[in-house]
Amino acid sequence: MSLLCIILAAASVPATFLLSNLFWRGFRETRGIAMFLSSPEYLQRIVTSDLLNRPPAEIERFAQPQTAGFASNMRAFREADQKAHNRGRSILRPVLLALILGSGFFGYLAFRWLGLAFPIINLFVLLSTFMASTQGSLDRSTVERAAEHVQIVAVILYRWYAVNPLEATEWVEGESQMKPLWEILTNLRTP
């Protein structure tokens, strides 16, 4: 029993690391999106006239005109993105809590009072991954997801402007972080 408790308590640390990285993924993606939107150089690399005129299927499906207009496309895309992140966090919250509490329980069974260091270590790992998510470097998959996100918004805005320039311009004016993207789209629209 004691060996099993040692293994379970020790295995909780790498498990906390892996699951907390998944838990904070939304923060990293938000940072990646902000990075793209704040840099005209990045935007020029990922938003091209070829992308806007012939987007890949995974981007095209979000840019199909809705009967309620392109504002509903933006709203639906944002809601789907938020729901995906919230769903993942809602599943991982109780799992991480059980992992941290379980590490204390099995740590106590294996090492008595000294084993209560495991939940403290796991909390430190959880907080460290949070700090890395908000300030550390972004991994390749996060950058790719952020780029795809920006490309989807670019295609929607581009098509929206073609159908209703006034409404698209008003929407962008209300979204200050979109102005650099809007400038790129404006430059691509003018021959």
Image (spheres, grey):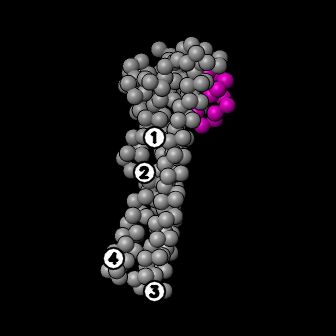
Q: Amino acid at mark 1?
A: Ala
Q: Amino acid at mark 4?
A: Leu
Q: Position of residue 144 (x, y in %)?
A: 39, 40
Residue 158 is tagged as none
Which label sits in the foreground, 2 or 3? 3
Q: Residues within 10 Å of mark 2 (few under 14, many from 20)?
A: some
Circle nearer the N terminus (2, 4): 4
- Is residue 3 shown in magenta? no
Separation of marks 1 and 4 at Cα, in angstroms: 42 Å
Mark 2 and mark 1 in contact (Cβ < 8 Å)? Answer: yes
Q: Which quadrant of the structure image shows residue 79?
A: top right
Instruction: Write the residue at 43% across / 76% down.
Output: 106
- Which residue in the protein does label 1 denote? 146
Circle nearer the N terminus (1, 2): 2
Mark 4 and mark 2 in contact (Cβ < 8 Å)? Answer: no
Which label sits in the foreground, 1 or 4? 4
* Disc 2 secondary structure class: loop
Separation of marks 2 and 4 at Cα, in angstroms: 36 Å
Circle nearer the N terminus (3, 1): 3
Q: Main secondary structure of the magenta part?
A: helix
| Stretch in magenta | 168-178
- Which residue in the protein does label 3 denote? 112
Q: Position of residue 55 (x, y in %)?
A: 40, 23
Circle nearer the N terminus (1, 4): 4
Circle nearer the N terminus (2, 3): 3
- Which residue in the protein does label 2 denote? 138
Q: Amino acid at mark 3?
A: Arg
Separation of marks 3 and 1 at Cα, in angstroms: 46 Å
